[in-house]
Every structure is written in C-alpha cells, then in structure tokens.
Amino acid sequence: LGKGYGEPIAYEGALKIKECTYVHAEGYSGGALKHGPFALIEGREGKQGSTPIILIILDDEYGPQMRIAAEEVKARGADVVIITDDASLAEGLDPNPIVIPRNGPLTALTAVLPLQFIAYELALLKGVNPDVPRNLAKAVTVD
C-alpha cells in the first residue's frame, strides 16, 4: 500500500513480486483500502496464516493516513511490513521497519530497492530463479 509518491512504488513492488515469485500481489492506494481489499485480509486463523501487507509510510502529507491504514489492517490480523523514512511512523505496528533514507520528493523511489529485495528473497525461498521469469522477455526487439 502507498499513497502520494508511494502509490506507484506500491504498484511496482507488487509487479516485481508477481514476476519473480508467481505469487499474486496487488498494489493499492492507501485510500482505496476500504473498497474491497479489507475482505481479503485474514489473521492467523486463515487457511495460509496472516495476510502479509507491505506499506510504504513516508514522512509526508500522507504519512498520518498511511499510519491509520496500517493500524486498520493490523487490527484485522494482517502481518504488517513497513517501509518508511521515519521509524517513529512504524511504532507499535512493525518492530523492525525497513528504514530508507530521506531524499525530498525522490524518497519514495528508494522504497523500490527493499521491495525488489523482498521479491528476490521470496523467489529464492520458493525455489524460483528470479533471473529467468517465465513468459517474460528480458529484452524486447522490434523490427
């Protein structure tokens, strides 16, 4: 989940997870959470355990809204992973947030790196070679 500059980064992170791991993932705006995705969140009692949700919570005008979104998904039993540029925004939600450096409006771009590493590590855990995604061309040639 992301909002503002973090929203397209959330889409990109979901895409990397899909491409590398063959696990269904969706990027959403933190504001669109109540329009359906809540129904998919499961707690520990779920068939496959808690639903993992990665949130990009930046110290910007959307930070408070994203924190509320994190509180809401955690209250429904989700396993929350927070990527942030201010660890205090993750207090009480994620004991080990992924802290990225601040870089003004470009801060959200640095959140791409931990998302790519998450996709890479998930692929390795599943025994999938992330360098050879199935049905995807690494280079596109045009005549």
Image (tube, grey):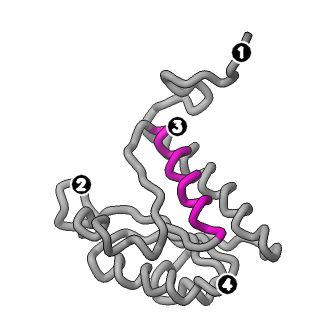
Q: Position of residue 137 (x, y in %)?
A: 60, 22
Q: Nearer the viewer, mark 3 or mark 1?
A: 1
* Residue that numbered label 2 is attached to: 48
Numbered label attached to residue 45: none
Q: Nearer the viewer, residue 119 or 19?
A: 19
Residue type indicated by callout 1: Val
Label 2 element class:
loop
Q: Secondary structure at mark 1?
A: loop
Please name the amino acid that badge 2 sits on.
Answer: Gln
C-alpha distance separating marks 1 and 2 = 43 Å
Q: Are marks 4 and 1 in contact (CB under 8 Å)?
A: no
* For discs 4 and 1, the disc positioned in front in the rendered view: 1
Report which residue position mark 3 lands on: 20
Amino acid type at mark 3: Cys
**Which residue position holds label 4?**
60
Residue 49 versus residue 72 in the image, above or below? above
Residues at marks 3 and 1, CA–CA distance in whole angstroms = 25 Å
Q: CA distance from mark 2 to mark 4?
A: 34 Å
User: Which residue is the site of mark 1?
Assistant: 142
Q: Toward the viewer: 125 or 138?
A: 138
Sequence-wise, the earlier of marks 1 and 2 is 2
Q: Is residue 48 left or right of residue 120?
A: left
